[in-house]
Amino acid sequence: MDRDRSEGSMKNIKGRMKEGLGKALGDSKMETEGKMDKAEGKIQNTIGGIKDSLRKDT
């Protein structure tokens, strides 16, 4: 598994936690940061998946 996939998954989890905490506390800035972290994690995870598939094909 590519390093980008594991880091992306961790950012996604961190983002979900941050977003949930922001909602619970009524902190819109923290909620927005969580959404951004979540999106960044999904993108990084996807890039890692592409790298993995390219390695398997060669």
Image (spheres, rainbow, N blue to C red):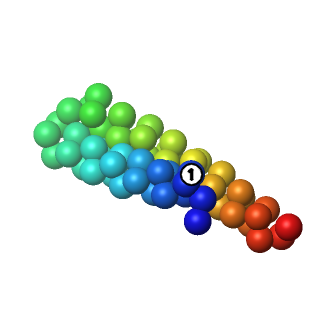
Farthest residue, direction top = 29
Q: Nearer the viewer, residue 21 or 58?
A: 58
Is residue 45 at all visible to an observer of this figure?
Answer: no
* Element under disc 1: helix
Q: Nearer the viewer, residue 20 or 11?
A: 11
Q: Quarter of the image holding residue 45?
A: bottom right
The residue that appears at 36% across and 46% down in the rendered structure is: 15
The residue that appears at 16% across and 46% down in the rendered structure is: 24
Residue 26 located left or right of residue 39:
left
Farthest residue, direction right = 58
Residue 49 located left or right of residue 30:
right
Amino acid type at image mark 1: Asp
Q: At which x and y percent is residue 25?
A: 14, 39
The residue that appears at 29% across and 28% down in the rendered structure is: 29
- Relative height, residue 24 to residue 49 (above, below): above
| Residue carrying label 1 | 4
How packed is label 1: few (under 14 Cα within 10 Å), some, or many (20 or more)? many
- Relative height, residue 20 to residue 49 (above, below): above
Q: Nearer the viewer, residue 23 or 47?
A: 47
Q: At which x and y percent is residue 49?
A: 65, 61
Q: At which x and y percent is residue 37?
A: 42, 41
Q: Quarter of the image holding residue 46?
A: bottom right
The residue that appears at 27% across and 34% down in the rendered structure is: 30
Residue 18 located left or right of residue 4:
left
Tell me the quadrant of the picture where the C terminus can be found: bottom right
